[in-house]
Amino acid sequence: MTSPFTVLHVCTGNICRSPMSERILAGLTGEDVYNHGAGISAYHEGENMQNNAMTELESRGFDPDGHRARHLLREHVEASDLILVATTGHLDYIAERFPEASGKTFLVRSFGPMAADLAETLPDGDTAVRGKALVDAADARRGDYEELDLADPWGMRQEVYAQIADQLEAALKPVAAALEAR
């Protein structure tokens, strides 16, 4: 087996959106996809994800256990094949600090439709081969898709976390399907 296809999930504090994104995609994919996350702020470093995020993941059958917030480091970016971010602000942050990663960095809500459209064009092969082809094809078609931010639910009611999880599932299911070998 080749190395796993590595997906980095990024938001601001790594306590709401990115851990939900990470755990949802991990629950939709197998061991050949490695999911990890980080935040552009170190403010919450070492903290668990927000209780509402944990509750929402559990209610959908995804595992919230063991999360600890991390601050985004160069080594996280360099070790990742795909970077999924919550907002255009996070996209800009990566582009400014890690310009070499711009081609593999996408808004999570925009990447889902890209993956759905490109899945049938991907080569046969293992997940890593398909994933890298997906990233390259999506980068070439980046301007064809609307930029969709994922709102920050921090401090909001459970219903808002449910909406965020709905948006993440809608975006990540086509990503998981595209990564699966045919």
Image: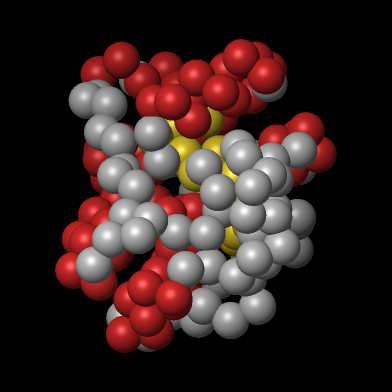
Q: Residue furthest right?
A: 75
Q: Which corner quadrant of the image does residue 81 belong to?
A: top right
Residue 133 seen by the camera: no
Q: Which corner quadrant of the image does residue 148 belong to?
A: top left
Q: Position of residue 169 (x, y in %)?
A: 29, 61
Q: Position of residue 152 (x, y in %)?
A: 34, 47
Q: Which is nearer the eye, 22 or 137?
A: 22
Q: Is residue 133 above or below residue 131?
A: above
Q: Residue at the spot x=44%, y=26% of the render?
A: 89
Q: Is residue 71 above or below residue 165?
A: above
Q: Position of residue 102 (x, y in %)?
A: 57, 20
The reply, left or right, for residue 79 in relation to residue 65 is right
Q: Which is nearer the eye, 28 or 73?
A: 73
Q: Which corner quadrant of the image does residue 160 belong to?
A: bottom left
The reply, left or right, for residue 27 in relation to residue 128 is left
Q: Is residue 18 above or below residue 79?
A: below
Residue 95 seen by the camera: yes
Q: Residue at the spot x=60%, y=45% of the render?
A: 39
The reply, left or right, for residue 101 in relation to residue 110 is right
Q: Which is nearer the eye, 38 or 138?
A: 38
Q: Position of residue 50 (x, y in %)?
A: 47, 68
Q: Residue at the spot x=25%, y=40% of the render?
A: 113
Q: Quadrant of the C terminus?
A: bottom left
Q: Identify the image's colour scheme: rainbow, by chain, secondary structure or one colour.
A: secondary structure
Q: Residue at the spot x=81%, y=39% of the render?
A: 75
The reply, left or right, for residue 88 in relation to residue 65 is left
Q: Is residue 164 above or below residue 61?
A: above
